[in-house]
Amino acid sequence: MKQQHIPLAREGYPFIALSGFITFILALTGPVVLVFVGLIVTLFVIYFFRDPARVTPNDPEAVICPADGKIICIKEIDDDRFFTGKSLKISIFMNVFNVHVNRIPLAGTVREISFKPGKFYSADKDKAALHNEYCAVSLVTATGIPYTVVQVAGLIARRIVCRAEIDDKVAAGDRYGLIRFGSRVDLYLPPGTKVEVALREHVRAGETILARLEVNQDS
């Protein structure tokens, strides 16, 4: 999985080019107010697709946040779509002003990728996790600990981008995809994982430590 080191996500280039082109045409032919609106839209699109560098903690037991946003769920659940048996679920809601590039929480190997079409309920609602379109990436760490990170579409978000491929070897903090225009990411971890964040806390992808694996986890 190729990594990029530029300040904009490549998936944003067509949108930036289109909005910039429309603004240019308006500057040649349209009234000033439309030119101003076009410029604002272009700047927002550039802002939305920003992809800042992040400094990922060098701690193999640290579960790194996969998305910018706000913690909206921390609980142990049974959800056999993504994890066998009970799991610790941590959900992050991304609004349209957050960075939308998603990152790998723990170093490991990609074992499975599943995509399911679905509804587009508001991503901060509980029913979004059950009914919305999603892309789930299941991985296993070098020590055999499984986990799954799930990109969930939202009310406005209608496009999930996942760059990961099966058998990819990934490091914590690696960029692996994004969701366009507001959404959520759900993380499923082994039960007993020590949580280090709180509900409604604002977190940053690639930097915030969400939890720590127990060293005596069974594989």
Image (tube, grey):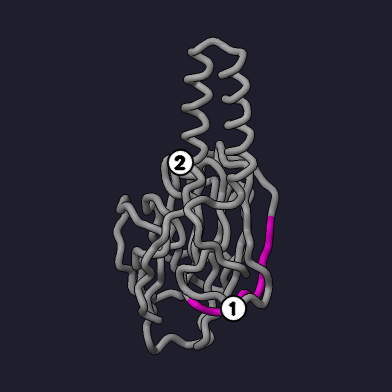
> Which amino acid type is marked by label 2?
Tyr
Q: Position of residue 25 (x, y in %)?
A: 63, 21
Please say if the residues under marks 2 and 1 sit with CB atoms less than 8 Å apart: no
The numbered mark, 2 or 1, whose residue comes first in the sequence reads: 2
* Image mark for residue 49: none
Residue drawn at (54%, 79%) of the image: 108
**Image position of 19 with respect to 75: above or below:** above
Residue 23 figure quarter:
top right
Q: Main secondary structure of the magenta part?
A: strand
Residue toward you, 91 or 1: 1
Residue toward you, 128 or 34: 34
**Image position of 21 with respect to 170: above or below:** above
Residue drawn at (37%, 50%) of the image: 70
Where's the N terminus, which quadrant? Answer: bottom right
Q: Secondary structure at mark 2?
A: helix
How many numbered circles does the render carry?
A: 2
Depth check, mark 2 against mark 1: the one in front is 2
Q: Position of residue 106 (x, y in %)?
A: 47, 74
Q: Position of residue 75 (x, y in %)?
A: 40, 62
Q: Secondary structure at mark 1?
A: strand
Q: Position of residue 204 (x, y in %)?
A: 37, 57
**Image position of 189 with respect to 99: above or below:** below
Q: Does the magenta portion include 111?
A: yes
Residue extending farthest to the front is 28
Q: Which residue is mark 1?
A: 169
**Image position of 138 with respect to 22: above or below:** below
> Which amino acid type is marked by label 1?
Lys
Q: Which residue is mark 2?
A: 47
Magenta stretch: give its range.
107-115
Q: Is residue 197 left or right of residue 34?
A: left
Q: Is residue 55 left or right of residue 117?
A: left
